[in-house]
Image: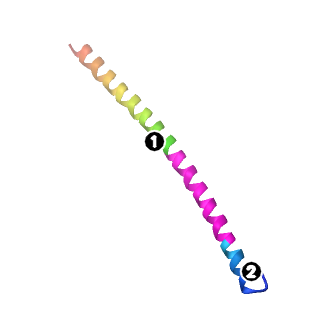
Amino acid sequence: MGQDSRTTVTEIEETRNDLAQKVDELMGRARIEATEAGKKLAVGAAAAAGLLLLGWFAKRRVGS
């Protein structure tokens, strides 16, 4: 830290700005990763629903 209070305040403000920018970057990355995970989950759920539906049709056909 600096010798006088003005230098100290300036350094603290610069550090705060740097940390705020890093937090914004991390939040942006987290948002992107959450979107990608949501898409993968939706595809998996659709595939599972398709398999269940296919199994249900096959069971009805074999049962008849």
Q: Is residue 10 magenta?
A: no
Would you say 42 lies left or right of 60 here? right
Q: Residue lying furthest bottom in this view?
A: 4
Residue at 58% x, 58% y is 24
Q: Is residue 33 magenta?
A: yes
Q: Which mark is residue 22?
A: none
Q: 26 or 3: nearer the eye?
A: 3
Residue at 30% x, 17% y is 58
Q: Is residue 61 above or below residue 41?
A: above
Residue 12 in the image, given as x and y percentages of width and height: 68, 75
Residue at 32% x, 22% y is 55
Q: Which quadrant is home to the C terminus?
A: top left
Q: Nearer the viewer, mark 1 or mark 2?
A: 2
Range drawn in magenta: 14-34
Q: Is residue 46 above or below residue 21?
A: above
Residue 7 in the image, given as x and y percentages of width and height: 74, 80
Task: Tell me the crowding category of disc 1: few under 14, some 14 to 19, or many 20 or more residues within 10 angstroms, Cα based.
Answer: few
Residue named by callout 1:
38
Residue at 44% x, 32% y is 43
Q: How is the image coloured?
A: rainbow
Could you tell me the amino acid type at mark 1? Gly
Q: Helix, strand or loop at disc 1?
A: helix
Residue named by callout 2:
7
Residue 17 in the image, given as x and y percentages of width and height: 64, 67
Q: Helix, strand or loop at disc 2?
A: helix
Residue 34 in the image, given as x and y percentages of width and height: 50, 46
Q: 25 or 48: nearer the eye?
A: 25
Q: Is residue 57 above or below residue 44?
A: above
Disc on the earlier residue, 1 or 2? 2
Q: Which quadrant is home to the N terminus?
A: bottom right
